[in-house]
């Protein structure tokens, strides 16, 4: 469930394409982040209370928070009360453009600096940064984590490993 302006919104289980991408992405990030102790990565089970959006808790498919923003005492029970620095949304066939745009607006309002919207069917990722227009990257391009993870790089194709040729 997500909480959107006080209303509980059920989340459907991810289909095979989205689930595969949503499992590839944290691994790619984790292998870069963990040895450098840059912060924490979450999969799709984490809920983030977006303080900028009234009574709204979103659950991105993948999220990252930089180490310096994490509470020294650790994460409390309940929704995480820090907006992610990076949120990744993997498109599913039933998600409307309006619903996606509402999610992206909530993340932006809460201060999320980097958003990746991954389309597993068409095999591209759209990168949203606060300071510039969205950029669409296709297989063959390199995805980077700037400004949140400036040294992170991976091939866009790595997000789609394990998917049937399409």
Image (spheres, grey):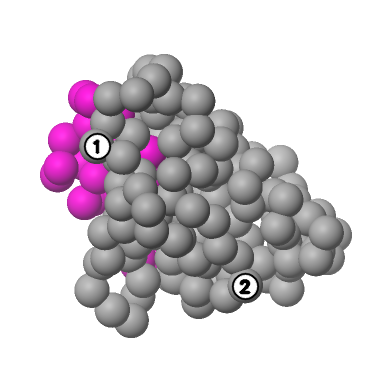
| Residue at left offset 24%, top offset 37% | 122
Q: Quadrant of the N terminus?
A: top left
The residue sitting at 38% across, 38% down in the picture is: 90
In this orientation, does residue 5 appear? Answer: no
Residue 131 spot, x, y in % from top left? 33, 81
In the image, 53 versus 66, the foreground residue is 66
Residue 89, image x and y in percent? 39, 44
Residue 70 located left or right of residue 81: right
Task: Give the residues in magenta.
Answer: 89-110
Q: Is residue 90 left or right of residue 34?
A: left
Q: Where does label 1 land, which residue?
A: 122
Q: Nearer the viewer, residue 19 or 3?
A: 19
Q: Is residue 50 above or below residue 119?
A: below
Is 57 or 30 nearer to us in this picture? 30
Taking the image as drawn, is residue 34 in sight?
yes
Q: Which mark is residue 151?
A: 2
**Residue ID at (50%, 60%):** 86
- Counting labels gives 2
Q: Quadrant of residue 17?
A: top left
């Amino acid at each position: 469930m997500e909480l959107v302006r006080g209303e509980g919104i059920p989340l459907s289980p991810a289909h095979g394409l989205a689930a595969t991408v949503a499992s590839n992405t944290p691994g790619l990030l984790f292998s870069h982040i963990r040895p450098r102790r840059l912060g924490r990565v979450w999969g799709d089970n984490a809920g983030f209370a977006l303080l900028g959006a009234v009574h709204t808790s979103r659950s991105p498919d993948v999220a990252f928070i930089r180490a310096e923003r994490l509470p020294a005492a650790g994460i409390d029970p309940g929704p995480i009360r820090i907006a992610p620095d990076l949120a990744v949304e993997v498109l599913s066939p039933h998600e409307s453009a309006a619903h996606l745009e509402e999610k992206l607006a909530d993340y932006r309002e809460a201060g999320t600096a980097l958003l990746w919207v991954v389309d597993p069917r068409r095999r591209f990722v759209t990168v949203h940064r606060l300071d510039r227009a969205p950029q669409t990257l296709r297989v063959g391009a390199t995805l980077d984590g700037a400004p949140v993870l400036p040294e992170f790089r991976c091939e866009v194709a790595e997000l789609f490993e394990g998917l049937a040729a399409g």
